[in-house]
Amino acid sequence: MAAFVWLTVITALRILGRNRLRAGLTMLGIVIGVAAVIAMVSIGEGAKRAVQKQIATMGTNVIIIWPGATTVSGVRGSQGGAVTLTVSDALDLKKKIPLLSDTGWAKRDVMQIVNGNRNWNGTINGVSPSYLTIRDWSFSSGGPFTQADLDSAARVALIGQTVAENLFEPGEEPVGAIIRIKNVPFRVIGVLSPKGQSAQGSDQDDVIFIPFTTAERKVFGTPFLGSVGAVFASTDRTDDLPEAVEQIREVIRARHRLQGEQADDFTIRTQVDIGKVQEGTSQTLTMMLFAIASVSLLVGGIGIMNILLVSVTERTREIGVRMAVGAKRRHIVMQFLIEAVTLSVFGGALGIILGVMGAKLTTVIAGWPTIISSNVIIIAFFFSLVVGLFFGLYPANKAARLNPIDALRYE
């Protein structure tokens, strides 16, 4: 049996070699299909990994509480759009919930920052010192402000890389320089390490951090001292996040005197929640790309079936001769199936090479992250074999059902 299969493979290669152009065009659909599947899924997995890295820049086990409801008539309100959260809320959460390792708060606005003859519109964030710890901000030079700076409303600032690049000359040291925000002088005491884009696509390095008390008293102004744009909290373990969220909800509802039937006047999201939404979107994109690429494989399978049907017609007399000298139907079926699989194998191998090259070129040319998975390569190759077998089955059966006498008479 093994010798018969091997001879059939040799015969199939010889037959396909007679019409190399036709065989090549037939394989093209399989080649494009396999290459598209590998390249598209690699791009999708790369996007998923990029989202995971962006989520990680938020900090570790972060919980964010925004004032106001999540949606109004289906549209989410802006952060800090309502005055329902205060510094006292954040301090009380840390006091009453042991699961929380720390709490912090922040309020932000976009303002012009001036350094000499340079200026830049950046995001000014009035924050507590604990906010920097929760968000896991590190420094490329200088260091953070302290609780003493917060208590005294000190005019000190921490600047992100984007702000530093736009306010200072290349090579100039920002630490120690005096910048002006809303005509108020601030001394730069630290330059933040770069974090890149957030999961929402905003530049996390286009920021300035100043003490919260300084922001509300000397820069932003506020009709209600102590109101914040967001409260931040963190836990030591990821598993503690769901329970911490429930305890936070209970404490804030009690502080805000919300009755059982009243809706929350705040919104809680965790780092895990945000990650799931972003990864879900990325997963949907990956599956959509995979489905689109799979269509090319099906088209390639139809091409194989078409060319084998033509081959059956062209080789009708040859099939009749083989049957006349003792070939059985299963031998004829095997011959055509092996021809179909041979086309699929060569097409799949070329598709793998092109798919890997395409994924790498996408990273080099477009700068998109790609992750080439060996599992995807195996699945795509296996799928191409299945397509070859499936679409080769009908022509093979058609050839096997030919009447030997009629086949011998065929001209």
Image (cartoon, rainbow, N blue to C red):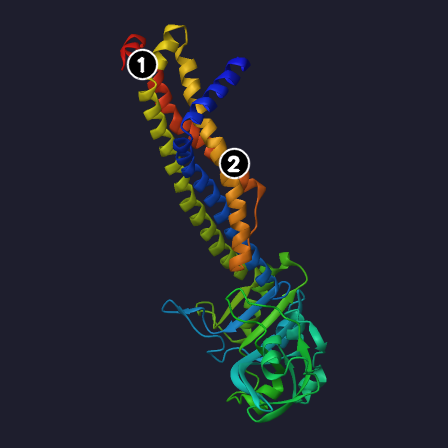
Q: Is residue 141 left or right of residue 343?
A: right
Residue 140, quarter of picture:
bottom right
Find the residue positioned furthest to the bottom: 183
The residue lying toward the viewer, choosing from 72 and 155, is: 155
Q: Secondary structure at mark 1?
A: loop
Q: Is residue 303 left or right of residue 49?
A: left
Q: Is residue 396 left or right of residue 95?
A: left
Find the residue positioned furthest to the top: 325
Point 59% across, 65% down: residue: 247
Residue designated by label 2: 349
Q: Secondary structure at mark 2?
A: helix
Point 55% across, 51% down: residue: 360
Q: Position of residue 85 (x, y in %)?
A: 53, 77
The residue lying toward the viewer, choosing from 212 and 382, is: 382
Position of the C terminus, as image quadrant, is: top left
Q: Amino acid at mark 2?
A: Ala
Q: Mark 1 and mark 2 in contact (Cβ < 8 Å)? A: no
Residue designated by label 1: 402
Residue 181, quarter of picture:
bottom right
The residue lying toward the viewer, choosing from 9 and 80, is: 9
Q: Position of residue 222 (x, y in %)?
A: 52, 88
Q: Position of residue 276 (x, y in %)?
A: 52, 57
Q: Residue 166, labelled with which disc?
A: none
Residue 118 against residue 253 in the figure, above or below: below
Residue 154 against residue 306 in the figure, above or below: below
Crowding near the residue tagged with mark 2, few <14, some 14–19, many ≥20 C-alpha atoms within 10 Å: some
The span from disc 2 to disc 1 (Cα, nearest Å) is 33 Å
